[in-house]
Image: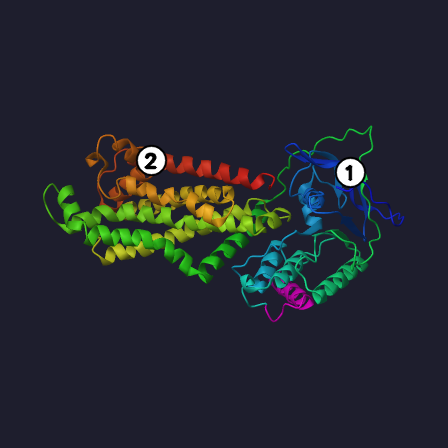
């Protein structure tokens, strides 16, 4: 980080951003070495420096995305360590790379931000339309953002930042990817924002073709001060905020599923193909083995369908892992973390959407099972209700695990690969043959895993037969996996991004 940039003007305005002794290291690499910042309200602050100087790190700290190792920081009059949610309510952030949802349209991206800023439907549409026009995106508003050029995505990214009318705006390399005309328009918009009293904190590698900043200050920390490290955040949300933001995120995920049904249908190919293969190719042989010499294929259909239904859940939740990883790699999670929303709402939206997709997938595969001869004539209404509850609980458990996998993966392909065991485990369970007919050395692998007790329980409920202790064991697995997945996912979500 550059050691010193001198004041260009003097002002008595109250600071919008004030930092003393700001320090940050990544392992043994010292990035920020005790710097002081003083940014008056209603000014442009330009932080200059080459790549690797620490500009982006400073923005991430000031926008609550990562924590500082030490320093006293106030943004918008709020202590960043003590009241981060109030800081988020005052700021808007555009990162170094465009953070837009490519699976929905430009207009839908804007309306998503309006919902997360809790604007009314009418006001949200008005603001979205105005900003789309301001950034010359009206003609492309109805097109998926994935089809936008780099410059269009950048303009949409900045327009999304302005939806909440923030008092302080962080722009990290704001003109990256913009053509000369768009760059000129961008600086004009920045001038208008500052004229309206907004504080603009921007980073850049050069000091040309942009409005002259009223202040550019960066001083090393003066000896003799001993600032305390930033403390952890405390929750600031209410029940109403949690419900509203989680519902917004759920609608976003359902929109993904509705807009791209092929993604879910592709995941269903494996369980459907396995069902048809084992019934029509191996059905007579398998039913003979299960029936002790008989060869009634309908017996094997009744046996295999419950296992295939739970295998369908393991296949479907891979989509949740991939979508979460896409949000990570596209910068959307970082954007949402800098907003004054209910923190876990993004994860809750993915989980709720994943569970609903699992239930719909099970119904679809179940319909295929009925079409080829599966019947559940001996199950009571209560057993049907319990079977539905087990399917929902099992889907909840595996979806939380899948979300954790997505958060821990560096890219969507890695997320898909990491979640592959959720498809493979049913293959070594009692889904296709009873566990006690397997080789002795293999039986523990089939018995001591979540799928076998869940499959045996579902099979007993649907066929009206005894389930023994499998019901309690299945519930224990579901509760344990849900707790593990929740802790893993939230820990990944709350950690400082690399």
- Quadrant for the N terminus, please: top right
Q: Quadrant of residue 30?
A: top right
- Quadrant for the C terminus, please: top right
Decide if residue 404 is on the left or right side of residue 280: right
Identify the residue at horizontal 41%, vertical 53% (top origin). Answer: 357
Q: Quadrant of residue 137?
A: bottom right
Indicate whether residue 124 is drawn in magenta: yes
Q: Residues within 10 Å of mark 1 (few under 14, many from 20)?
A: many
Q: Quadrant of residue 107?
A: bottom right
> Picture coordinates of residue 285 (x, y %)?
15, 47
Identify the residue at horizontal 48%, vertical 58% (top origin). Answer: 256
Q: Which mark is residue 342?
A: none
Q: Nearer the viewer, mark 2 or mark 1?
A: 1
Q: Which residue is under mark 1? A: 35
Most prominent secondary structure in the magenta stretch?
A: helix
> Picture coordinates of residue 108 (x, y %)?
56, 62
Range of magenta residues: 120-140
> Picture coordinates of residue 278 (x, y %)?
22, 50
Whether residue 189 can be seen here: yes
Decide if residue 6 is on the left or right side of residue 279: right
Compute the Cα span from label 2 to label 1. Answer: 53 Å
Name the outermost residue toward the left: 293
Which element type, helix, strand or loop, lies under badge 2?
Answer: loop
Identify the residue at horizontal 47%, vertical 57% (top origin). Answer: 254
Q: Which residue is under mark 2? A: 449
């Amino acid at each position: 980080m550059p050691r010193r940039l001198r004041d260009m003007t003097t002002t008595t305005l109250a600071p919008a951003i004030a930092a003393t002794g700001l320090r940050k290291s990544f392992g043994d690499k010292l990035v920020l070495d005790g710097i002081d910042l003083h940014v008056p309200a209603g000014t442009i602050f330009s932080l200059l420096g080459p790549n690797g100087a620490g500009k982006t790190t400073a923005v991430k700290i000031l926008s609550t995305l990562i924590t500082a190792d030490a320093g006293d920081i106030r943004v918008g009059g709020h202590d960043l360590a003590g009241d981060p949610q109030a800081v988020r309510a005052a700021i808007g952030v555009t990162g170094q790379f465009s953070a837009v949802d490519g699976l929905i349209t430009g207009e839908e991206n804007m309306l998503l931000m309006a919902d997360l800023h809790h604007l009314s439907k009418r006001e949200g549409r008005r603001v979205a339309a105005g900003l789309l026009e301001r950034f010359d995106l009206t003609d492309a508003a109805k097109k998926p953002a994935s089809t936008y050029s780099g410059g269009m995505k950048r303009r949409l990214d900045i327009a999304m930042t302005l939806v909440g009318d923030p008092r302080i705006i962080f722009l990290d390399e704001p003109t990256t990817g913009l053509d000369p005309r768009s760059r000129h328009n961008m600086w004009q918009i920045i001038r208008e924002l500052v004229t309206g009293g907004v504080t603009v904190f921007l980073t850049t590698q050069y000091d040309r073709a942009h409005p002259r900043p009223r202040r550019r200050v960066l001083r090393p920390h003066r000896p003799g001060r001993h600032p305390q490290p930033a403390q952890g955040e405390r929750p600031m949300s209410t029940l109403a905020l949690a419900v509203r933001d989680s519902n917004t995120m759920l609608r976003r995920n359902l929109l993904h599923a509705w807009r791209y049904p092929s993604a879910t249908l592709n995941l269903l190919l494996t369980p459907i193909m396995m069902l048809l293969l084992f019934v029509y190719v191996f059905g007579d042989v398998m039913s003979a083995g299960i029936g002790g010499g008989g060869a009634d294929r309908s017996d094997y259909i009744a046996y295999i369908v419950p296992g295939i239904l739970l295998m369908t859940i393991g296949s479907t939740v891979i989509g949740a892992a991939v979508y979460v990883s896409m949000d990570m790699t596209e910068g959307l999670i970082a954007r949402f973390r800098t907003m004054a929303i209910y923190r876990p709402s993004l994860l809750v939206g993915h989980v709720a959407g994943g569970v609903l997709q699992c239930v719909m997938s099970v119904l679809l595969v179940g319909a295929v099972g009925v079409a080829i001869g599966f019947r559940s004539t001996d199950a009571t209404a209560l057993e049907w209700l319990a079977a539905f509850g087990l399917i929902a609980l099992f889907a909840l458990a595996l979806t939380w695990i899948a979300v954790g996998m997505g958060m821990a993966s560096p890219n969507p392909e890695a997320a898909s690969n990491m979640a592959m065991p959720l498809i493979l485990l049913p293959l070594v369970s009692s889904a296709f043959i009873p566990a006690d007919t397997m080789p002795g050395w293999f039986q523990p692998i089939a018995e001591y895993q979540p799928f076998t007790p869940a499959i045996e329980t579902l099979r007993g409920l649907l066929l009206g037969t005894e389930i023994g202790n499998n019901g309690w064991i299945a519930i224990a697995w579901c509760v344990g996996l849900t707790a593990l997945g929740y802790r893993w996912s939230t820990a990944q979500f709350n950690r400082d991004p690399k």
